[in-house]
Amino acid sequence: MAQIQTPQPVRGMQSLLGEEADRFHAVVAAFEKTRRLFGFKRVEVPVLEPTAVFARSLGETTDVVSKEMYSFEDRGGDSLTLRPEFTAGIARAYLTEGWQQYAPLKVATHGPAFRYERPQKGRFRQFHQLDAEILGAGEPQADVEVLLFADQLLKELGIGAGAVLKLNTLGDPQTRAAWRAALYEHFRGRVADLSEDSRDRLERNPLRILDSKAHAEWPVVDSAPPIDDFLTAEAADFFAAVTSGLDAAGVQWERAPRLVRGLDYYRHTAFEFMTDRLGAQGTVLAGGRYDGLIESLGGPHTPAIGWAAGIERLSMMIDAPKAEAPEAVLVPLGDKAEVAATAILTGLRQGGLAADMAFRGNMKKRMARAAASGAAFAIIIGDDELANETAQVKDLATGEQRAVAFDMIAAAVTR
Ligand code: ATP
Ligand code: MG
């Protein structure tokens, strides 16, 4: 008979168990808690969108659109793409689902995103993001609000000290155009020092050269003119309002005058929370104002701002969460005892106690399993116990054991 080959997982796509899965969910739980405190409404959006949703909004020349998207034709011949991020899909829903009536709309969500990248530490092909957006708000207060949410989330996760907020403004369209022209001049005179990728970016979008990961070109990037030389008075005022909001809330931030975001739709505020704990993958949370995005999807001019954070990267930074353990583990011996144990188990669970049953092996093996589960109590039921309708309840920490009537077990294991 031919040997059946077990299919391997898709490269860069992880399956998690135990501590890794617990870390992941601890991040999501902290996000949910903070989301509620800040009044961001939950939203759910599809994992698949028409390819145009991302191609138009992110910009055809961005790395994500030109190299990283999982796009395919479905059976009906439509080009679909697995979301590489949330913002574009939320903006699409804002337009097609009538969400505009709720502006300013504060929303948050989390889930998988997909990018065809070279997998490495902190970089996967299926990864997961937390996402927060405020749509239909052009006030700097909205920028402050999303930044405070991000800051409090990182503090809630216990990594506030390990991540620094780097903040910049990309100005208004006038600022951006003037800066772009100056960057073009700067880099055009130093083409020899640029990587091939960056030469490509020079003609299409010289701002993106600043986002370079090619270390060799950092000097030519560092000497590029900062945006401050080109800020209009309005853009400078807007940025000042954002920073004074952060200062009022006691949020630490650092100015990063050459920070740009990889995507085309950003205006005004741009930011990243950076860490030095994850090697090359230093950005844990990133975002900014994207006032041009909704128009690029055919909608009305709609200012908006938001951020996304990588759940895997945050998971690696937090302290290991306490492993889950049941309060009690039933240890029955014999078929009849197992039936009685099933009834008791159900009663405990319905009463809100986490409980489990050890159903494999001899008494010794079952007790070992109960202890390994981290449970506080083992509830032992053998033939004698069945006859008396009592169980032996053993405190697994102290080793103390006592007889407890079946109908008193819940009380005996409630601490
Ligand atoms: P990077 O510079 O690391 O590629 P990015 O600028 O492409 O990040 P964004 O598009 O801003 O990332 O996505 C927001 C966040 O999502 C990132 O800060 C990061 O935490 C996470 N992220 C992005 N791509 C990946 C990936 N391939 N694997 C894991 N996390 C990712
Ligand atoms: Mg990237």
Image (cartoon, grey):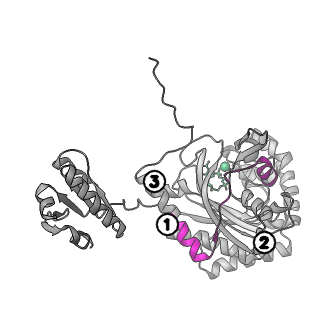
The residue stretch that appears in magenta: 29-58
Q: Quadrant of the C terminus?
A: bottom left
Residue 136 x, y percent position in the rendering: 78, 71
State which tag comes first along the sequence, 2 or 3: 3
Q: Secondary structure at mark 3?
A: helix
Q: Nearer the viewer, residue 78 or 85?
A: 78
Q: Secondary structure at mark 2?
A: loop
Q: Amino acid at mark 3?
A: Ala
Q: Amino acid at mark 2?
A: Gly
Q: Nearer the viewer, residue 11 or 392?
A: 392
Q: Nearer the viewer, residue 211 or 110?
A: 110
Q: Give the alpha-carbon distance from disc 2 to disc 3, as whole Å.
A: 36 Å
Q: What secondary structure characterizes most of the magenta part?
A: helix
The answer, for residue 222, to whether it is visible in the render is yes
Q: Is 34 part of what is drawn in magenta?
A: yes
The answer, for residue 152, to whether it is visible in the render is no
State which tag comes first along the sequence, 1 or 3: 3
Q: Quadrant of the N terminus?
A: top left
Rendered image: mark on residue 21: 3
State which tag comes first along the sequence, 1 or 2: 2
Residue 71 x, y percent position in the rendering: 72, 41
CA neighbours of label 1 inside 10 A, class few (<14), some (14 to 19), many (20+):
many
The residue at the point 85 percent across, 66 percent down is 230
